[in-house]
Image (cartoon, rainbow, N blue to C red):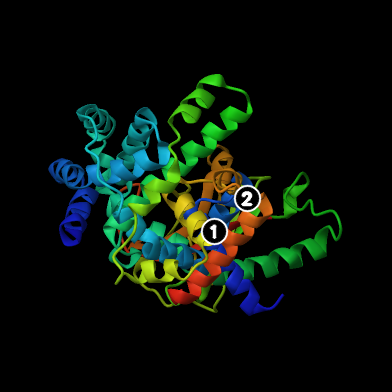
C-alpha cells in the first residue's frame, strides 16, 4: 500500500467517522489515532465543515426550559475550571497538534528498544520493567523539532528526560514539564534540563495516572518556577505519549 | 450570528456565565433540533443537549478560529455525543434490555420523507455534489449524517445487503471527497 492510498484511506476513514457509520471498535480506533495523527484530525475537521450544511437545514426545535435548568445546575459554580480554560485549551491544541513527527520518532525508538531487549516477546512494558521504560514521549518545539525524549519508568517510578540537541538556548528561565491527562488536566512533573539528561523521581500515586496521560508539555516559567500548580508561562513544547 | 457565537465562546472560556446563558439562547434550538433528529426521543435528545452544553462550558477555551466555524464545532459536539448514546442504546438492545428496544422501535420515523426537507439550495456546493451521487449512495450518506445510522441500520432502512451499503457509503464519500476537493 503506497502513501497515496494511505492518505486516501485516512480521508475516507475520517468521513465515515464524521458520518457515524463506523462500529464501536473502528470508532475508538479513529479517536485514538486522532491523538497522534494530525492529518486524520484535519480531515475530520474538514468533513465536519463540509457536511455542516446538512445539519444547518435541520429545523430548530426549542428545548424545554428544564434543560437549561439542568445545564445551569451542572456548570455554574465551576468557574475556577474556566479560569484556566484558555491556557488548557492552548496546550490541548499543542498536545494534539504537531505530534505526528514525535510519534514517528517514538515508534523508531520503541522498535529499537524492543529489538535490543526482548526480540520476540513484545513484553517490554510489562514486568521486569526495571530498566525499560513503560512509555515514551518526544517533546517537540513549535517547529516540530524534537527537544526532549521523556521516558517513563514504573520500577522505581521516575522519568528520564534527555535533551535531543546539544543544548537548548534558554537562559534565566525555568523549563517545567507537565503531564497532560485525557480529561484536560495537567500535573507538574519537574524541571527539565537544557542539556544532557536528568532523572526526575515520580510520586507512585502519580504514576498510577500514567494510563490517563496522553501527552507531555513544557512551559517556560520564571527561574523561581510557576507560582501556581499550573503553567503560567508560554507552553512552547509538547509531545504525545506512546506506551511501549 | 457566527461572529456573535464566536465572541460569546471566548467569553464563556473566561467563565462568563452571562455569556453562556446568551450562547444557549442563541444556539440551543438549533442544537436541540439536531439532537432530536438523531435521538428520535425527547428525553434522550435533552440528555444529549445537556451533556453537550456542559462540555461546551468546560471546553470553550479549546475552540479556536482555525478549528472552523463555532457552529460547526458545537454541532459536532452534539452529534458525537448523540452517536455515543445511540451506540449505547444499541448495545443495550443487543443485551435484551426491553425498555431501550421499545423506545427506539416506537419512535424511529420513516426517514425517507424527512430527507427531502434537508435539500439544500441548488447553488450549495454540497448539494451539487450530493446530486451527482447515485440514489443509494446519497441516501446512505444523508441518513447516516442526520440520523447517526450504522451500516447495519442503513442496510435495514434502504433494504439492501450490508456489503452493498458499506460499499455505497465508501464510494459515495470517495466521490464527495473529490467533488468537494477534500
| Circle 2 chain | B
- The residue indicated by pointer 2 is B160
Q: Chain of mark 1?
A: B
Query: Badge 2 local density, few (<14 within 10 Å), some, or many (20+)?
Result: few
Mark 2 secondary-structure assignment:
loop
Residue A146, how many percent across, how many down?
53, 73
Q: Which residue is mark 1?
A: B136
Q: Which residue extends farthest right?
A: A120
User: Could you tell me which quadrant the N terminus of chain B lies in?
Assistant: bottom left
Q: Along the line of sight, which residue is nearer the eye, B16 or A222?
A: B16
Q: In the rendered image of this protein, does residue B106 appear above or below residue A123?
A: above
In this picture, residue A64 sits left or right of residue A164: left
Res A73 visible: yes
Tag 1 secondary structure: helix
The residue at the point 27 percent across, 47 percent down is A59
Mark 2 touching mark 1, by CB under 8 A? yes
Q: Is residue B122 left or right of residue B115?
A: left
The residue positioned 35% from the left and 37% from the top of the image is B51
Foreground residue among A159 and A99 = A99
> Which one is nearer the viewer's eye here, A8 or B36?
B36
User: Dividing the picture into quarters, in which one does residue B63 lie?
Assistant: bottom left
- What residue do we see at 62% from left, 79% from top? A4
The quarter of the picture where residue B119 lies is bottom left
Question: In the displayed structure, would residue A35 be above or below residue A205?
Answer: below
Q: Earlier in the sequence, mark 2 or mark 1?
A: 1
Real-space CA distance between mark 2 and mark 1, rounded to the nearest whole angstrom: 9 Å
Is there one chain holding both mark 2 and mark 1?
yes
Estimate the x, y position of residue A239 in percent, counting from the top left. 51, 63
- Look at the image and tell me whether residue A137 can be seen: no
Amino acid at each position: 500500500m503506497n502513501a497515496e492510498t494511505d492518505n486516501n484511506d485516512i480521508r475516507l476513514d475520517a468521513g465515515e467517522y464524521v458520518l457515524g457509520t463506523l462500529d464501536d471498535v473502528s470508532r475508538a480506533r479513529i479517536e485514538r489515532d486522532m491523538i497522534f495523527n494530525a492529518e486524520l484530525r484535519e480531515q475530520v475537521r474538514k468533513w465536519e465543515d463540509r457536511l455542516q450544511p446538512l445539519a444547518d437545514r435541520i429545523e430548530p426545535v426549542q428545548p424545554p426550559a428544564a434543560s437549561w435548568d439542568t445545564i445551569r445546575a451542572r456548570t455554574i459554580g465551576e468557574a475556577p475550571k474556566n479560569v484556566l480554560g484558555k491556557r488548557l485549551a492552548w496546550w490541548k491544541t499543542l498536545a494534539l497538534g504537531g505530534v505526528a513527527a514525535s510519534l514517528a520518532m517514538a515508534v523508531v525508538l520503541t522498535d529499537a528498544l524492543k529489538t535490543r531487549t526482548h526480540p520476540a516477546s513484545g513484553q517490554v512494558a510489562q514486568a521486569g520493567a526495571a530498566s525499560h521504560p513503560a512509555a515514551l514521549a518526544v517533546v517537540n518545539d513549535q517547529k516540530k523539532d524534537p527537544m526532549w525524549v521523556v521516558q517513563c519508568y514504573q520500577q522505581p517510578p521516575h522519568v528520564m528526560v534527555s535533551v535531543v540537541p546539544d543544548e537548548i538556548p534558554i537562559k534565566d528561565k525555568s523549563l517545567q514539564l507537565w503531564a497532560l491527562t485525557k480529561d484536560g488536566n495537567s500535573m507538574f512533573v519537574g524541571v527539565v534540563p537544557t542539556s544532557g539528561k536528568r532523572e526526575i523521581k515520580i510520586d507512585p500515586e502519580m504514576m498510577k495516572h500514567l494510563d490517563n496521560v496522553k501527552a507531555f508539555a513544557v512551559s517556560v516559567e520564571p527561574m523561581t518556577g510557576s507560582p501556581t500548580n499550573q503553567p503560567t508561562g508560554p507552553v512552547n513544547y509538547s509531545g504525545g505519549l506512546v506506551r511501549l | 450570528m457566527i461572529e456573535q457565537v464566536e465572541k460569546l465562546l471566548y467569553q464563556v472560556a473566561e467563565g462568563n456565565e452571562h455569556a453562556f446563558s446568551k450562547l444557549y439562547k442563541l444556539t440551543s434550538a438549533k442544537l436541540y433540533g439536531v439532537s432530536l433528529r438523531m435521538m428520535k426521543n425527547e428525553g434522550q435528545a435533552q440528555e444529549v443537549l445537556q451533556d453537550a452544553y456542559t462540555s461546551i462550558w468546560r471546553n470553550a477555551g479549546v475552540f479556536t478560529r482555525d478549528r472552523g466555524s463555532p457552529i460547526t464545532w458545537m454541532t459536532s459536539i452534539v452529534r458525537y455525543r448523540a452517536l455515543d448514546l445511540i451506540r449505547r442504546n444499541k448495545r443495550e438492545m443487543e443485551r435484551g434490555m426491553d425498555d431501550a428496544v421499545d423506545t427506539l422501535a416506537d419512535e424511529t420515523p420513516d426517514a425517507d420523507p424527512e430527507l427531502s426537507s434537508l435539500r439544500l439550495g441548488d447553488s450549495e456546493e454540497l448539494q451539487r455534489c450530493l446530486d451527482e451521487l447515485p440514489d443509494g449512495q446519497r441516501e446512505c450518506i444523508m441518513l447516516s449524517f442526520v440520523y447517526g445510522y450504522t451500516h447495519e441500520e442503513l442496510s435495514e432502512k434502504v433494504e439492501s445487503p450490508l456489503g452493498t451499503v458499506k460499499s455505497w457509503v465508501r464510494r459515495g464519500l470517495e466521490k464527495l471527497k473529490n467533488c468537494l476537493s477534500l
